[in-house]
């Protein structure tokens, strides 16, 4: 029996190691792939020299450091943050279909960012990144509050998800109402942003978004033990010394901050927060937070880097909305998950 347990533990460790190595390899390959994709092809040797020695052809240097690297880092960091936000919401609601896009959290962020872009710019000449993130965070919290109010009276999770979708429609309707009274330049900017894209971000934006997402990741990772206890039920978590009320508040704040930061910089992006945590749990064959949290972060980055590559190159020079591509690859995962859950219950 002990030998079987030892063999089983060894198999699990090998699987965990294989998943993390696979994600890291995919991350490295996609980084080089994305750097070398575009109208200007740059040899891999030149890419390595420019990145590691900061020397090389000036044109290639500017293409890599001013255009492609900020976009790659943004897609990786924000993709990881969005997947992590989805995992936290799934933990909070106890349902794998919960996510920032489905529950209307992204739409709440979109509404408040639209308010800033349309209303605030009439009174000030410049809106900082921090103001955009704060607006998106407040919008996410308000939308989450409405979902939580609905959760008090709605016991069925399927109906709660419907309530989240309705909140999303309401936020979108208010946003469209604001656009009706916006100036033409504001409408163009808001439309481009609302389509979802990792393009156009500068290094200052990369630094701010990376700081917020990485600090949030560290905080969430340090919460691995209470999250694992909470997954076993509130009563079990309390017996393990977890202050459930405070823990739930922190969970909401972290998931809203991550979703809001992503929405502020890249617009609303669909299905990443649902599909990636499910895929990671399926690959690891465990829901242990200490493993799922870093794997989700890596997996979200890999998923968004891949989708961003498709968005840029599939119909070049025309660029697709990143949300269109993430939905194309993420929605089938969600459908398969629903079918699998339904078959298991039957």
Image (cartoon, rainbow, N blue to C red):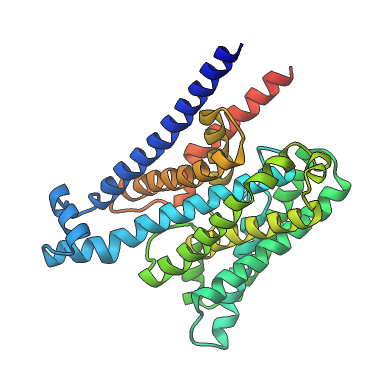
> In this image, 158 relative to 219: left or right?
right
**Residue 212 seen in render:** yes
Query: Residue 230: which quarter of the image?
Result: top right
Quadrant where the C terminus is found in the figure = top right
> In this image, 287 relative to 315: left or right?
right
Q: Residue at x 53, y 65 (%)?
A: 264
Location of residue 205 with respect to 29 vertically, above or below: below
Location of residue 1 with respect to 192 vertically, above or below: above
Location of residue 107 with respect to 17 vertically, above or below: below
**Looking at the image, which residue sits at the far front?**
2
Q: Position of residue 16 (x, y in %)?
A: 48, 31
Q: Position of residue 231 (x, y in %)?
A: 72, 39
| Residue nearest the viewer, comparing 150 with 14 | 14
Quadrant where the N terminus is found in the figure = top right
Q: Residue at x 56, y 69 (%)?
A: 133
**Looking at the image, which residue sits at the far left?**
57
Q: Residue at x 51, y 80 (%)?
A: 127
Query: Residue 55: which quarter of the image?
Result: bottom left
**Looking at the image, which residue sits at the far top?**
1
| Residue nearest the viewer, comparing 199 with 74 | 74
Q: Position of residue 185 (x, y in %)?
A: 47, 76
> In this image, 119 relative to 200: left or right?
right
| Residue nearest the viewer, comparing 38 with 344 | 344
Q: Position of residue 53 (x, y in %)?
A: 17, 61
Q: Residue at x 15, y 65 (%)?
A: 59
**Residue 325 seen in render:** no
């Amino acid at each position: 029996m002990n030998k079987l347990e030892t063999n089983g533990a060894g198999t699990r460790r090998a699987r965990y190691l294989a998943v993390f190595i696979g994600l890291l390899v995919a991350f490295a390959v996609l980084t080089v792939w994305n750097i070398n994709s575009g109208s200007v092809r740059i040899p891999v040797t030149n890419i390595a020299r420019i990145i590691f020695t900061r020397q090389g052809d000036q044109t290639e240097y500017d293409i890599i450091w001013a255009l492609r690297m900020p976009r790659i880092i943004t897609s990786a960091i924000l993709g990881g943050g969005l997947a992590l936000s989805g995992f936290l919401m799934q933990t909070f609601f106890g349902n794998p279909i919960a996510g920032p896009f489905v529950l209307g959290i992204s739409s709440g962020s979109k509404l408040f960012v639209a308010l800033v872009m349309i209303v605030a710019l009439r009174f000030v000449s410049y809106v900082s990144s921090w103001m955009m993130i704060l607006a998106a965070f407040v919008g996410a919290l308000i939308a989450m509050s409405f979902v939580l109010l609905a959760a008090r009276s709605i016991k069925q999770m399927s109906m709660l998800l419907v309530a989240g979708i309705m909140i999303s429609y309401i936020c979108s309707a208010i946003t469209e109402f604001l656009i009706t009274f916006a100036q033409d330049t504001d409408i163009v900017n808001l439309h481009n942003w609302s389509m979802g894209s990792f393009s156009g971000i500068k290094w200052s934006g990369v630094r701010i978004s990376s700081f917020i997402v990485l600090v949030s990741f560290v905080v969430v990772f340090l919460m691995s033990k209470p999250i694992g206890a909470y997954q076993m039920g509130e009563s079990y978590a309390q017996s393990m010394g977890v202050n459930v009320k405070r823990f739930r508040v922190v969970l909401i704040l972290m998931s809203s901050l991550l979703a809001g930061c992503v929405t502020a910089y890249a617009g609303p992006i669909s299905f990443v927060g649902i599909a990636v945590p499910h895929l990671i749990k399926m690959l690891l064959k465990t829901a242990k937070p200490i493993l799922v949290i870093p794997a989700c972060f890596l997996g979200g980055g890999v998923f968004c880097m891949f989708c961003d590559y498709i968005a840029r190159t599939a119909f070049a020079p025309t660029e697709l909305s990143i949300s269109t591509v993430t939905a194309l690859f993420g929605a089938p995962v969600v459908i398969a998950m629903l079918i699998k859950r339904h078959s298991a219950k039957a």
